[in-house]
Amino acid sequence: MTYFQNNDDLLAIRESVAKLCEDFPGEYWRELDRERGYPTAFVNALTEAGFLGCLIPEAYGGSGLGIREASVILETVHRAGGNGAACHAQMYIMGAMLRHGSEEQKKTYLPEIATGRLRLQAFGVTEPTSGTDTSRTRTTAVRDGDDYIVNGQKVWTSRAEHSDLMLLLARTQPRDAGKKPHDGLSIFLIDMREAVGNGHRNLFR
Ligand SMILES: Cc1cc2nc3c(=O)[nH]c(=O)nc-3n(C[C@H](O)[C@H](O)[C@H](O)COP(=O)(O)OP(=O)(O)OC[C@H]3O[C@@H](n4cnc5c(N)ncnc54)[C@H](O)[C@@H]3O)c2cc1C
């Protein structure tokens, strides 16, 4: 993993992102705001420059940078008048897979996420009756052979219509079955492409 230790390296990242942002001036963002649109061209440019894959290790096709460099990238986007919230989750959601996924999952998904061929930038955590206290999550996932049957309701799922995959938080055992309230919570990688045209739409592709 590469860590940038000095300000010169961070400055180089800042300059590079600022240069990219020059192609997306205030009028670009104001127009999107009027149309309530999504900054597809901007997100594509940021992806192609490798910035959205910055936290993915080099072994999986990313640039293996750290959270400090990621912060500088997003800070520079906002400093230039852009909106990193449209795509910042493409940087960090994969962290759950990096830490807890199998080697097979990492080899399958991370290089695709690094290039932007796959968008993993949605996470379904919040529910109508569960916000800050995620231990109150009511969505359940019950094993049925090789599958899980998921039941529940999620709200506030940002970027769902601009994402291929979603990370979903669900209970695989009741809250009071474990030693701690958060025991028995599991995360699932949901392929939302299977639901396109069947109650879901993807506006990015
Ligand atoms: C723009 C936006 C985008 C979002 N995107 C997503 C998303 O992509 N995916 C997703 O899953 N969720 C998303 N959320 C949901 C967000 O994460 C939740 O709103 C958040 O978890 C808070 O939940 P809540 O609104 O139910 O508030 P509550 O949890 O009910 O909290 C209400 C208030 O009580 C305070 N509070 C809560 N618990 C305590 C405590 N123990 N002590 C003191 N104060 C407390 C809170 O700070 C808050 O002020 C988004 C929200 C917004 C506004």
Image: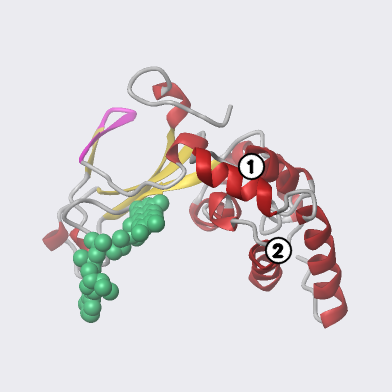
Give the position of the N terminus as an image quadrant.
bottom right
| Disc 2 residue crowd, few under 14, some 14–19, many 20+, Cα 10 Å | some
Q: Answer whether residue 111 is visible to the viewer in this image.
A: no
**Which residue appears farthest toward the top when viewing the image?**
197
Q: CA distance from mark 2 to mark 1?
A: 25 Å
For the stretch drawn in magenta, what is the main secondary structure?
A: strand
Q: Which residue is mark 2?
A: 80
Residue 59 in the image, given as x and y percentages of width and height: 75, 51
Does 5 appear in magenta?
no
Does 150 appear in magenta?
yes
Give the position of the C terminus as an image quadrant.
top right
Quarter of the render that holds ligand 1: bottom left
Number of numbered discs: 2
Residue 83's label in the rendered image is: none
Amino acid at circle 2 = Ala
**Magenta stretch, residue numbers:** 144-152
| Disc 1 residue crowd, few under 14, some 14–19, many 20+, Cα 10 Å | many
Confirm or deny contact between disc 2 and disc 1 (CB under 8 A).
no
Q: Which residue is mark 1?
A: 113
* Above or below for 101 versus 18: above
Q: Nearer the viewer, residue 143 or 80?
A: 80
